[in-house]
Image (tube, rainbow, N blue to C red):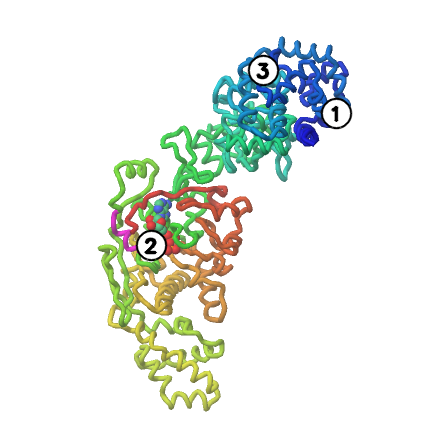
Amino acid sequence: MKYENVDIFTFNSCKPKKEQSPVGSGTEENAGSKESPAEVIKENLAELGNDSPDEISPENRNMSKIANSIEGAPDPVTSDLITSILTSDTEEILQPPLFEDMRKDCLENVPDLTPTKSSIESDIKSDIESDIESDLEFDILSGHAEAIFKSSSLSTTAHVSKTASLPLSDLSFESEVLGSSVKEAFPFEGFAGCDDNVLKAAPVSEAFGIVTTGIEPLELTPSGAVITGYITSARRSEIRLGTYVVVPYENREKLFARVGKLQYRQEFVVDDATEIHSRRMLSAGGNPVNEDDYKFLACLDPLCILYRKADGKLTRRMADRIPHPNTPILPVTDRLEVQTGLNIPEEGIFLGHLSVGGELLKTNSEPETVAYYLRNDYSMGDPLIFRHMLICGSTGTGKTFLSKNILRQFLREDNRYRLRSSPDKARKNPCLVIMDPQDEYSQLFEDNETLTDGDKFRFESENVTYGRVLSTRAFVAKVDGQRYPGDKSRAEQIEFTIPFSLVEHNSWLIAAAGMSELQYIGLEVLLGDFFKSSVPHTYQNFVNHIDNEGTRSYYVDSGKLHESSYDGIVRRVRNPFFSKVFDRDATSIIDLVDKIFKPGQISVFPTEYISAPRIRDLIVLTIMSLIVDNKLNTTGKEAIKETPIILALDEAHRYLSNANGEHSRLIISRFADAARQGRKEGLGLFLITQDPQDIDDTVFKQINTKLILNLNNDAAITSLKVPKEYERRIPYLKKGQMIIHSPDNSDIVEIIGLSNCVVRHR
Ligand SMILES: Nc1ncnc2c1ncn2[C@@H]1O[C@H](COP(=O)(O)OP(=O)(O)OP(=O)(O)O)[C@@H](O)[C@H]1O
Ligand SMILES: [Mg+2]
């Protein structure tokens, strides 16, 4: 019974594959076959040596039986065992003369593989002692497997998983490599087929491994590539999905690639999907995998070929060459190579540092990190901020922190934009207009006191702008019963009110009170007539006007408006919150336009202090439409038309959500128009949201740069339409880590934002 189990286990773990050429045929090729039973036995013999342990206790005699049986002293139990290990093809190998020859051969040729007597003893003994004291069945199994498969050269580095039937040549190579501990001394020079020029051009000591054709053929087609790399055991922990590598060609060109797939494969005949193997691994108490038992493969997705143009400038082109087999796979250590390979601008608006799997990518340059910049010049069209930007991430993932860091970059004295429509074509600093629902952005007026000199030095070395912006002003809407605390910063506060006259061309400002389509049409009629009248165009006058019995009968009796529509409109317009907002005792926002839209200024509109969401929305929508209308209108106010404006809209989904209802469709289409003309008019949208899926499609399509922080909502992730391999990472992004999808700026990449804020963020 016990031996039946033994047979199953040992058979599974060491039976040669049927398709292997028959062993014992006497040809050298067969003898050298990696998976031939002859090899297995050769190796086992080498393992055991001449001396069988003689100090093994009688209770554990199974081990000594195995050893004895291999020595040619048949034992009824172990001879069964060995017979069961081998297939019929292999039986003749067990004939003593051949057996003895092989043993000698083995011992002569591979002295380094021969374990010392004491190592065998201790191996066997410890297996016997530790494994199963009382379970004879398992004792035999483990002892047997150990004796048969253990390679002495490998056993110097680890104990448990050295179960292998290596071909002898491989073993001697392996032992040499393993002996020379780490990165250096990989004998790439010795690989046949590797182009010498390639090796001369490449510091092979840094190589992760080589391009191999041993598993899959190397392949490059217009639709894709199969480029497999063998990664040497010392470097495996450094490779992860997304790691960037270069593979040199003979003429100094380099393939720039990204690791797109990682794979372990069995190096030896023995597979690890066996009962015995798993039990031994489990009983070994979490010993690490022995890398030498496995091939570790990295499949490379080619991104481009790096080459130098005649003028010496590093450039990239499509990956149109296949790398040579056996060429080293090298880490990317040159910052310019990374930037060129990923098409990242060398300067612009600093967004963060390139990273892979949450770790900063380090190069040999100084500083060693690779800064990621957003194109901010006219060399390839317009600065990309005018093609709009979206920051999205679940709540608390660092949207505001990141936004402050980025927005601050636009407020550099030398950052100037030209407006195409501007008659003098003068370049001007932009004005940042920030809708601030949590009262955080007025802190752009304050320094971050926690920045150290070291931080500042690093910022300067990478052209990161930091420090307070003195031209930060808070514009505070006057709302009855609400007070702006203004205690977050010392920025100047300027009160304003929204004049009802603005509603003349923006009837939706009061339609936001939830009118039906019919009511909205009626409202437009009423407003049209009211604004034609000579009475002052205040909210109160409008309410008085429509509340009047005479007016009512004028519209209802004449059939201009249905009775129920009319009454519905009046009810909604009389909503008390309108009276708290319109025409308050403060300067009209229209009169403040010159103060708000000033080049080089940050104009913050805090709304947190207002408890009614509808009032907050009304204020935000008013500012949005003020900007959009004046930018789009040929006769728009000069302060708006002639100033490059970056409009930062936190909680953007609230204002730009998929339109339902006539009035919101109107807002959206105006906004989408403004977005489309952003480049011409100098209007950049900087949208911040946790629900990107709610942003209207027409606006969404206009966004060129998406910064994606951690999101865990599937609908949100899908709406971003990033390639699948990046999509899967989004729920795992750590704070500060993000994916940048900005097709006109660079390839899609992962970056990490600054870990400290360039201005105050509390
Ligand atoms: N890159 C970072 N490194 C260190 N701390 C960070 C980073 N990003 C954000 N934080 C910290 O995380 C917290 C949340 O950040 P933040 O307020 O920017 O999140 P948010 O996404 O804007 O949240 P909300 O959804 O509430 O608006 C803050 O305390 C901030 O200081
Ligand atoms: Mg926030």
| In this view, the mark in front (1 or 2) | 1
CB-based contact (under 8 Å), mark 1 and mark 3: no
* Residue shown at the point (63%, 24%) measured from the top left: 144
Cα distance in 3D space between marks 1 and 2 = 80 Å
> Which amino acid, mark 3?
Pro
Residue carrying label 1? 87
- Secondary structure mostly seen in the magenta stretch: helix
Give coordinates of residue 739: x percent, y percent: 46, 45
- Quadrant in the rendering for residue 351: top left
* Residue shown at the point (75%, 25%) measured from the top left: 87
Give coordinates of residue 272: x percent, y percent: 61, 32
Whether residue 474 appears in magenta in the rendering, the answer is no
- Ligand 2 within 8 Å of disc 2? The answer is no
Cα distance in 3D space between marks 2 and 3 = 83 Å
In the rendered image, the vertical position of residue 743 relative to residue 202, given as above or below: below
Give coordinates of residue 650: x percent, y percent: 38, 57
Residue carrying label 3? 53
Label 3 Cα crowd, 10 Å radius (few <14 / some 14-19 / many 20+): some
- Quadrant in the rendering for residue 45: top right
> Which amino acid, mark 1?
Thr
**Where are the magenta residues, as a range?**
440-447
